[in-house]
Amino acid sequence: MSIEAGINMEFIRCEDKPFAAGVARAAQLGYRYVEPMVHNGRELLSEAGYFHSFSMDNEPLEMKDILERNGVRASGLSAHIPLMRPEISVPYLEKAIRLAAVVGASVVNTDEGIRPDWLEDAECFHVMRYTLKKVLQVADRYGVYVAIEPHQSITKRTDGLLRIATLVDSPWLKINYDTGNAFLGGEDPYQGLKASLPLLVHVHAKDISVRQAENEQGKVTGTPVGCACGEGVIDWAKVISILREAGWSGVLSVECGTPKQAADSLAHLSAILAGRPAAGKEVRR
C-alpha cells in the first residue's frame, strides 16, 4: 500500500450524526479509509443517533457491514484510554483489538491518558508497562498493532512518546504520530516524525490554524481536531516527503472538525500525493 488519505470520524461530530451516516458521508467525499471511534457500554448520544462513536458491545460485524456497504476500510480504531489505569484500560483495549481484527483494521490508537493525581513519578512507567504487557498478548494473537499517540503530559515530547512506545519489547507496540498535537505540545513535528519512523504505523494528519497556534502552542498537550489540512501551520509537502524518503506506506488519517474541512483536506493531500499543485492556504512557520 502507498500513502493514502483517510478520515477520522470526528469530522461528522458537528452535525450530530450516527456512525453509519458519518461513514456514508466520508465515502461520498471520496475517502477510502475511515478511523472509527469506539467506546464501552451504552451511552445516550450514540444510542439516539446523535454521535458517531461505535459501542464495542454492538455486534462487531455490524461495523464491518457498514464499512463494506460504503466501500471503505478502517485504517485503525480510535481507542483512547488511560494506560495508567489498568483496571479500565486492559479490558477496553483487549476488546478494541478483537473488534479491529473483525473489521480488518490493523491498528488500535491510544495514548497514556491523563495521569492520575495519586500516581507518583516513579510509578507511571511501571503501571503502563504492566498494561501494555497484558494487552500486547492479545494484540499478538490477533495481529493488531497498539499505537501510542502524542497527546498528553508524557507523550507531548518525542522522548516521552518513544519511551512509552518501547516499554515492552513487542513487534505489536508502535506509534501513531499526530502532527498537530506534537506542534501544540511544543515539539518540531517534522523532527518528531523522523524520530518516530522506525515504529510508525499510522499518522494523524492534523493541521493547526494560525490563531490556535498563536494562542495555544506550548500551553496544551494536544487538541481534539484541527483545521483543514493546508489551511494551517503544518507543511504537508514536507510531511509526505519525509514519509516517502523513508519508504513508509500507510494512511494519513485527517483529524478535522467539519465535512467541509474533510473535503478540503482530501483535495490538498491528494494533490501533494499526486505531485500536483496543492490547493489551500498552507502557512510555513
Image (cartoon, helix red, strand yellow):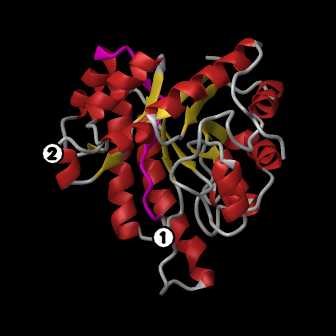
Q: Amino acid at mark 2?
A: Ala
Give the quarter of the image for residue 9. top left
| Image location of residue 180, percent across then percent down | 66, 49
Q: In the image, what residue occupies the spot 77% across and 57% down?
A: 187
Give the structural element (helix, strand or loop) at label 1: loop
Considering only vertical position in the picture, is 79 above or below 241? Answer: below
In-image side of 95 versus 207 (left or right): left
From the viewer's side, name the closer residue of 90 and 250.
Answer: 250
From the viewer's side, name the closer residue of 78 and 226.
Answer: 226
Return the residue at label 2: 48
| Image location of residue 82, percent across then percent down | 45, 65
Considering only vertical position in the picture, is 100 above or below 149? Answer: above
| Image location of residue 177, percent across then percent down | 65, 45
Q: In the image, what residue occupies the spot 52% across and 75% down?
A: 115
In-image side of 81 versus 214 (left or right): left
Give the structural element (helix, strand or loop) at label 2: loop
Q: In the image, what residue occupies the spot 26% across and 37% down?
A: 18
Q: In the image, what residue occupies the spot 61% across and 17% down?
A: 1
Q: Which residues are magenta?
A: 69-82
Q: Given this view, does label 2 or label 1 mark the residue nearer the observer?
A: 2
Considering only vertical position in the picture, is 237 above or below 119? Answer: above
**Main secondary structure of the magenta stretch:** loop
Q: Is residue 70 magenta?
A: yes
Give the quarter of the image for residue 265. top right
From the viewer's side, name the closer residue of 263 and 92.
Answer: 263
- How many discs appear? 2
Return the residue at label 1: 84
